[in-house]
Amino acid sequence: GENVEQHPSTLSVQEGDSAVIKCTYSDSASNYFPWYKQELGKGPQLIIDIRSNVGEKKDQRIAVTLNKTAKHFSLHITETQPEDSAVYFCAASQGSSNTGKLIFGQGTTLQVKP
Amino acid sequence: GAVVSQHPSRVICKSGTSVKIECRSLDFQATTMFWYRQFPKQSLMLMATSNEGSKATYEQGVEKDKFLINHASLTLSTLTVTSAHPEDSSFYICSANLWGREQYFGPGTRLTVT
């Protein structure tokens, strides 16, 4: 079936450094790619998303890039802060996203050391 | 972003009893709601897709008679875990979206079956 691979599974950086999380997807019809941040004991929070008609999107310290040809997309966090520590999930729409169904990656635990 | 609430946030029940979890979209009308289950340190597992006014669509391997879903209105969906057993203990999360657009998650419900 369709799947999303996410790497790395854990990532530890020093405060102020950048963090990059990468995902690849298999469904060539996917056209919507959100990223979620999940803190312990809470639900996932949408932090940024990108649609297939653009290659890059930025929101302050967070950016997402998309390479549709290679079927991969990445999350970039610059100037990391301790409060960025959480589990991050990438996702890809199942097909053209009209159903809203998402396929999630396995998650990346980001630790930002002060 | 849009706000999705869940109630209760935590519930403990005895084996054999049923538990109902509510999911509400507070500031938008959700055409579709999703129910996920999440085990510790794992990704989100989609259980079912719920559309207002129609029967829920369950993912393969999810028992529809055990996990009853009702989507009574554009702002409310409920998940009832019937005849709960300890193996049903998990973190249940709902999400909602409008016509295939951004998907927003609730805060989750921690179910413990004793």
Image (cartoon, rainbow, N blue to C red):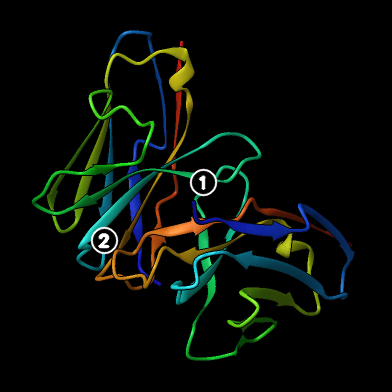
- The x and y percentages for residue B41 are 66, 39
The residue located at (35%, 68%) in the rendering is B2
- The x and y percentages for residue B104 are 39, 62
The residue located at (51%, 46%) in the rendering is B44
First in sequence, mark 2 or 1: give its number. 2
Do tags 2 and 1 sit on the same chain? yes
Judging from the image, what secondary structure is the residue with disc 1 in? strand
Judging from the image, what secondary structure is the residue with disc 2 in? loop
Report the residue marked by disc 1. Answer: B44
User: In the image, is residue B92 above or below residue A9?
Assistant: above
Total marks shown come to: 2
Task: Say which of A40 and A25 sits in front.
Answer: A25
User: In the image, is residue B71 above or below residue A44?
Assistant: above
Report the residue marked by disc 2. Answer: B26
Q: Decide if residue B99 is on the left or right side of residue A52.
A: left
**In front: label 2 or label 1:** 1
Task: Say which of B93 and B57 sits in front.
Answer: B57
